[in-house]
Amino acid sequence: MLFHPKMSAALTRIAAVRSVEADDAGSLVARKIRTDCPEGMVRVVAELNSPITTLSGQAAAVLLKVKIEAFGGRTEARWRNRLQALVPIEALDTLAADPLLKYLRLPLHPSKLQVTSEGVARTGADRWVSLPAYRSGSAGKICVLDVGFMGYQALLGTELPSKVTARSFRADGDIAAGEDHGLACAEIVHDMAPDAALWLVNFDTDVEEGEAVDWIVQQGIQVISYSLGWYNAGAGDGTGPICADVEFAAAQNILWASAAGNDAISHWEGNFVDPEGDGWLNFSGSNRYLEFHVPAFEEVDVSLNWKDWGTWNGWDYSGTDQDYDLYLYLKQGSSYVLVDSSTNIQKGGGQWPTEDIYGWYTDHDATWAVSIQRVSSTKSVPLEMFIEGNDTAIQYAVAAHSIAVPADSDSAIAVGATDWEDDSYHYYSSQGPTWDGRIKPDLTAPSGVSTATYGHWNFYGTSASAPHVAGGCGLYRGRTPFTASQVRTLLQNRAVDLGPAGKDNLFGYGRLNLK
Amino acid sequence: MKTRIMILAAALFFAAAVSAEAGFHIGLTGAYIRPLDKNQGGAPAYGLSVGLDLASNLSLDVSVLRYESAVTASTDGLSAGQLAVIPLEIGVDARFPFGDGKLAAWAGVAGGYALPQFTYDSTAASAWNAIGFTVVEKVRSGPCLGVMGGLEYALSSTSVLRLEVRYRLMKASGSWSMADRTGGLTQSGTLDNLNLDTLTLGLAVRIGL
């Protein structure tokens, strides 16, 4: 085969085959190399010697258009020095020899740059791709329940299934909600369980979440991926309104993979110690301030609760009559400047034992501090505080009991974070036990993985881990006949045990393993 | 039940043999089986028979046949795989000669027991096995009943060629299980009312002894 110096090798091959074989042989070759070949013509790009914006370029383009039409072809588009046209295969040689042309080639096509979480291979989910479903009834149905799915439409057919069901339970009905967190989670779910049907559901409040879960149950969803956590929304013993949503879903045989939380370095707990009797809690010695560092423009949220929630009756707690208040300070030099306080009244009228301050930030990196004041108390109860916004461990951090609500629910599969590459524990991953003494998390799964939304090796947190488990659950539910409770048993039986032998408060049963 | 039927069939056959005036014959059958369940594919079948001439135009036969059909998965039925079936039957048929006696029509009924064996698709089984799951599917044996008829042509004084069409009724049940070898967890279920009915088009040679 002779190569024309002004024609690409692929076009030369098409032209050569056409010249020595049957009329449609060139078309067949064109199809083989995935080239458009409508009406026996081939789509080409003719590169001119000069841009069309110049006089000579424009003249060349016009002349070339006439010549192509004379061959029975037609031009389709032009830009700068490139002219896109459909040309009969038998005219390729003649056209390439034309002095108006610099080069004749096939059009370039973009590639869809797909990103797959490294957790897929780590957990063995990739080995399920070739597995036929066995008496599962239907492909998995997985719902990502999150705060927002900004830009999900752009990822349909690549990072997400070509079709998803999206539904917002926000008051404003905005599925995007200015957040792409849910989108990154959905990507991982799809990476893990590519043939599972996907629902994207968002909400903003506890009430909206309740409505969303009701609707999810009606959809016949089998698995919920939940990379969210709540503070001051439950006693940390598996009770409370958010945990009730999980229990309701679990009662309908829905598996709920819940991020354990990223609070191992942002959590404090202790009893009220006040040797001076001044009404302020001493975190250590005589120090009544707990400090933490927050980067510029990072929002500071502080949530305090104490373990006197009363009895949970299925929709509310009986409440507390122990009263503490929370104070937030900005450290300036060696002094603390009061910024905000939370002084809810707790007098036994059903009030929850919670105080929270949120929404503060500075335009520079800063050290903040909190203090806790006793208003009235008749007994000693453990106090617990979660801080958000800190970039390093808070002072006096206590990792134990840092599991976020609703991962503390017995019905949730609480998922901690381990490194996708070596299964090492990620320092921030929340630890158990729960406040009623149960070991949590239940499993760990890869974190620090790649997604199109967050980039290469850039999705950290138990938020990244939970969708891996949700995807794994989707594989089991979509391809095996095992029930939801059996799938939980399978997950724990097959987990790669990490840390101390058996279930422990860092790794649970171990890292998700599907092989 | 199965044993009783087999004993009864054997007793019937030998009682007839003892009291019969004429001799025995043996036969070889080649056939094409078309299962009536759309998820089971057609398949060639091979079999043999031993018969007893009860009268000049009445015979009693014990026959065995084997076929193996490819199964595609269905929701309530079997998974993808191979279903081998061996119907073991005893039947009575009557000949109705016409013309010069070389050609005859014949018809009969048969009953017995079908012995099915299902093998789950080997590729799928290997794939599941590779990640620690064992899949087993079984079909239990059960009674079968058939009606048949056709034409018979006498090749010689001791041999005949038979064209046979047979409709065989076979209902079976079975079970399935998927077991996780890592933790011993097993999920299982039953397969009820499996339809193993078949239509057979066969050619048999019978040789008198």
Image: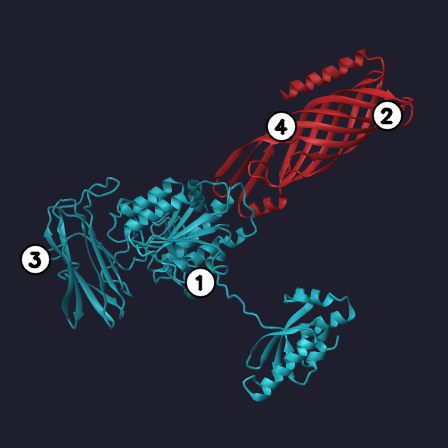
Chain colours: A cyan, B red
Q: Secondary structure at mark 3?
A: loop
Q: Residue at x 10, y 46 (%)?
A: A378
Cβ atoms under marks 3 and 4 closer than 8 Å: no
Taking the image as shown, residue A318 lies to the left or right of residue A137, namely left
First in residue order: circle 1 vs circle 3:
3
First in residue order: circle 2 vs circle 4:
4
| Distance between the alpha carbons at the discs numbered 2 and 1 | 75 Å
Cβ atoms under marks 2 and 1 closer than 8 Å: no
Disc 1 and disc 3 on one polypeptide chain: yes
Tag 2: amino acid: Ile
Query: Which numbered mark, 3 or 2, is in the foreground of this view?
Result: 2
**Would residue B11 be visible to someone looking at this image?**
yes
Disc 3 and disc 4 on one polypeptide chain: no
**Residue beneath disc 3:** A278
Query: Which numbered mark, 1 or 3, is in the foreground of this view?
Result: 1
Q: Residue at x 44, y 61 (%)?
A: A153
Please give the chain letter of the residue carrying mark 3.
A
Taking the image as shown, residue A5 lies to the left or right of residue A312, namely right
| Distance between the alpha carbons at the discs numbered 1 and 3 | 52 Å
Please give the chain letter of the residue carrying mark 2.
B
Residue A101: numbered disc: none
**Residue beneath disc 4:** B171
